[in-house]
Amino acid sequence: MRLAPVSSPEQPAELDYYRGMALARLERWKEAKEAFESGRQKQPQDKRFPTELAGVAFKQQNFTEATAELRRALRLDSGDRYAVDFLATVYLLEGNVEAALDRWNRIEKPQIENVTIDPRPRVDPILLDRAFTFSPASVLNLADLRTTEARINALGIFPRYEFALSGRPDEKGEEGGKFDLVFRSTERNGWGSSTVAGLVSLLRGLPYLTVYPEWYNLKRSATNLQSLVRWDAEKRRLFATLSGPLERDPKWRYRVYVDGRKENWDISRTFFGNGFGSAAPVSDLKLEKLEAGAEIQSIESGRWSWKTGADLSHRRFGNFTPANSEATAFFTDGYALKYDAELDAHVLRDPERRITVDSTASGQLGKMLRHGADPFAKVEGTLGVHWLPQPQGDDYETSARVQAGQTFGQPPFDELFTLGLERDNDLWLRAHIGTRKGRTGAARLGRNYVLANWDIDKKIYENGFLELKMGPFLDSGKIYDPSRDFGSRVWLWDAGGQLKVRILGGPSVVFYYGKDLRSGHNAFYLTVARN
């Protein structure tokens, strides 16, 4: 250290580098960092300085700084295998397996020796093995891992799971650059993992007169039966769906369902057709509907999947006869046949910045099965962004979504879009309650819509028993109808906050407070979300 006791502007960058290296060996991290910083100012294009600064930060357990420095080094030389390997290792230590693989795959790493499963789930091992699109004694590719995750998600029996890379020592007992891949999971079997879990799942909708009888992994085949029973006098509903893999292949999945409803609607403030001669506001429209259908889904890869299906339905309306002939077409009794198709795709997945952008496009083509009825069609598109701004965990989780839909022809009333908070609707404006005195119909209805939702969840408390998240939201949308019998007339703006409570990793109880920024009305809402 006598050669250069301190850095100076006059001494060459090479001397700063060697001085920093010597100080790093002595674990004098602050002085080593100062030396490397001095050298970088003199030679900003020399990749050695950000690489060594990353090493100093790593030794001090500052992974965020180490990551930033390694990115700078790779901007100077994207082919530096040492920096790529180092950065991937940092991501792995942070628990970001996807980011680690994204970097490692560029240098044909990591080599997987074994794939282990701990604990061993009850599901058919052949089915689970076919869901894994990678194999031992090969390089683990990020695309294969994502395809595997997509197919495991589709099985519907693993509410929580992870793939962990475990370093494998070489013959000398040191880390040799090879790994074992470990699959760890919590599995749903029967009606729950325990009596308490089963009761919580079954009764999670009890505050709104609903129970959810469910049975998972029938005969260890990932075949699941899910149902809903609601005895609310204003909106009774019975729903059941059975889904499972086709021919023990997790790429393909079938679903059959039946849905029966008997509802009372109050559309006195959302249906404007009564201005054409109806005697009174429509506050007691009765709707009875029975629907049955089937669909097939194919998980092509971790990037995209598709599904298609068809259903037959019958509806009957009561307590209302519109005076306007155009409005009458919405409330026509009878059978309808409908074909559905959907495509889901990941537009962007950036594991280093923990951002995903997903898209969905769907279409329906239907026809009332009566003489003279014209076909109707519906198309929808969704673009969603999900961002986890922290290097680890899900604090400040941010989501944004934009949706739009349009109909063609003359759809029946129950096929209209709905903007508002309602348990059977997923187009939420969180300050517009979809019911009035228990009756559906208070939310805005129409044939075409645009909707945007944004929210942030800040984790405010967590231990092994309880998790609390809180954050703001902002919703905006408008719903249109060419007939002017329905629609919102103006853009709607809702703002507010949400509190999510989860106990023992079970269903989340979500409390919403929203304010309609146009009318000033307040809304309070509670729902229970399944994991």
Image (cartoon, rainbow, N blue to C red):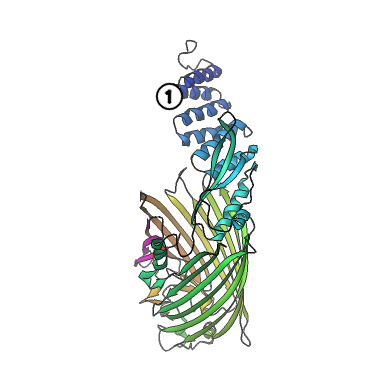
Residue at 54% x, 45% y is 182
Task: Look at the picture and state if 320 lies above or below 511.
Answer: below
**Magenta span includes 432:** no
Where disc 1 sits, the SS reads helix
Question: Residue 106 lies in what quarter of the image?
Answer: top right
Residue of label 1: 30
Relative to 201, is 118 on the left or the right? Answer: right
Report if residue 430 is visible in the image: no
The kind of secondary structure the magenta stretch mainly shows is: strand
Residue 185 place in picture, x, y as percent: 50, 52
Give the magenta part as a residue range.
498-526
Residue 86 place in picture, x, y as percent: 55, 33
Residue 439 place in picture, x, y as percent: 39, 78
**Magenta span includes 516:** yes
Numbered label tally: 1
Task: Look at the picture and state if 266 lies above or below 122.
Answer: below
Residue 55 place in picture, x, y as percent: 51, 28
Residue at 39% x, 51% y is 458
Q: Name which residue type carries label 1.
A: Lys
Query: Dividing the image into 4 quarters, which one contains the C terminus?
Result: bottom left
| Crowd around label 1: few <14 · some 14–19 · many ≥20 (10 Å) | some
Residue at 60% x, 39% y is 104
Question: Residue 107 lies in what quarter of the image?
Answer: top right
